Image: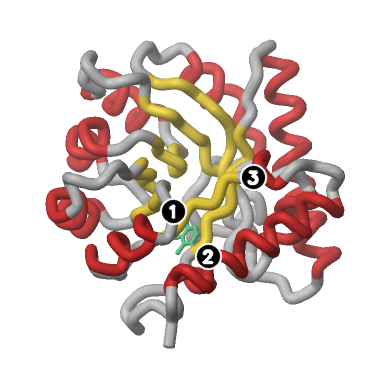
Amino acid sequence: MHNFHDKLIEVRDRVQRAAERANRGAETVKILAVSKTQPASRIAEAVSAGQCCFGENYLQEALDKQSQLSDLNIEWHFIGPIQSNKTRAIAESFAWVHSIDRLKIAQRLSEQRPVTMPPLQICIQINIDDEASKSGVRPLELPALAKAVANLPRLQLTGLMAIPLPRADYGEQLAAFQRVADLQQSLQQSLDCALPTLSMGMSGDLEAAIAAGSTLVRIGTDLFGPRVASDS
Ligand SMILES: *Cc1c(COP(=O)(O)O)cnc(C)c1O
């Protein structure tokens, strides 16, 4: 049996212990429940358990669930790759986007963000392991992209997101997350502005991410159970 409430308590406990080891309060780490492939009914169950932020990767799937759950007070985060013909719906339907790696997408989101809504919260996704097939901007290209995104009027650049290669060894996980944190530090200096968010850490590596300074962990499997086979 997979009861969301019990799983949420376990994940909160892991976050709390990791934060304590890093001499931080657990409230400095936000838990994003990654609900891709999960039906709206499971999201409703999660909201009843006290979870308010949900991350989705696939636009159409997310829009369907949003319309089914429109009476609930949910903060929606888009965390998947973005095609340019999808930006309008994303700009109109989400509070956060974690997966910005091209200026063109950011420009479209800024143009299309309704003026009646608060600025869209943006994380730039870093390809921290320099993987050929992965989304994310290369570290060398980060400063120019961040500077341009920070100047877009309807977006609020809040930090960085990364999905390092899966590694079994805690020390290796920590080193990869530390490289993301170092990029955040140097970017804050070069842009001379605060970038408080580090969106990093998933079910298998949230402890190392928090040790390196994560402020937002994106948890799917350890909250909802395994996803259906077509997804990774
Ligand atoms: C699926 C996904 C997650 C959650 O991964 P789990 O290992 O299931 O916790 C986090 N971030 C992104 C970008 C994802 O696509």
Q: Is mark 2 within 8 Å of ligand 1?
A: no
Callout 3: helix, strand or loop?
Answer: loop
The Cα–Cα distance between marks 2 and 3, rounded to whole angstroms, is 14 Å
Instruction: Name the residue tied to disc 2.
Output: 8
Q: Tell whether label 1 touches label 2 (CB within 8 Å).
A: yes
Q: CA distance from mark 1 to mark 3?
A: 14 Å
Q: Which residue is mark 3?
A: 29
Q: Position of residue 88 (x, y in %)?
A: 19, 33
Q: Quadrant of residue 33?
A: bottom left
Q: Nearer the viewer, mark 2 or mark 3?
A: 2
Who's the residue at 30% across and 38% down the image? 94
Three-letter residue code for mark 2: Leu
Position in image of residue 38 (x %, y %): 30, 69
Circle 3: residue type: Val
Percent coordinates x, y for residue 32 in the rendering: 49, 52
Regarding mark 1 in the picture, which secondary structure is present there? loop
Mark 2, residues whose alpha carbon is within 10 Å: few (<14), some, or many (≥20)? many
Quick check: marks 1 and 3 in contact, CB under 8 Å? no
Answer yes or no: is residue 43 visible. Answer: yes
Q: How is the image coloured?
A: secondary structure
Label whose residue precedes the other's in the sequence (1 or 3) = 3
Label 2, secondary structure: give it.
Answer: helix
**Amino acid type at mark 1:** Gln
Q: Which residue is mark 1?
A: 51
Q: Residue furthest bottom?
A: 1
Q: Is residue 185 above or below residue 72?
A: above
Indicate if the residue with disc 1 has its beta carbon within 8 Å of ligand 1: no
Crowding near the residue tagged with mark 1, few <14, some 14–19, many ≥20 C-alpha atoms within 10 Å:
some
Residue 49 as seen in the image, left or right of residue 66 = right
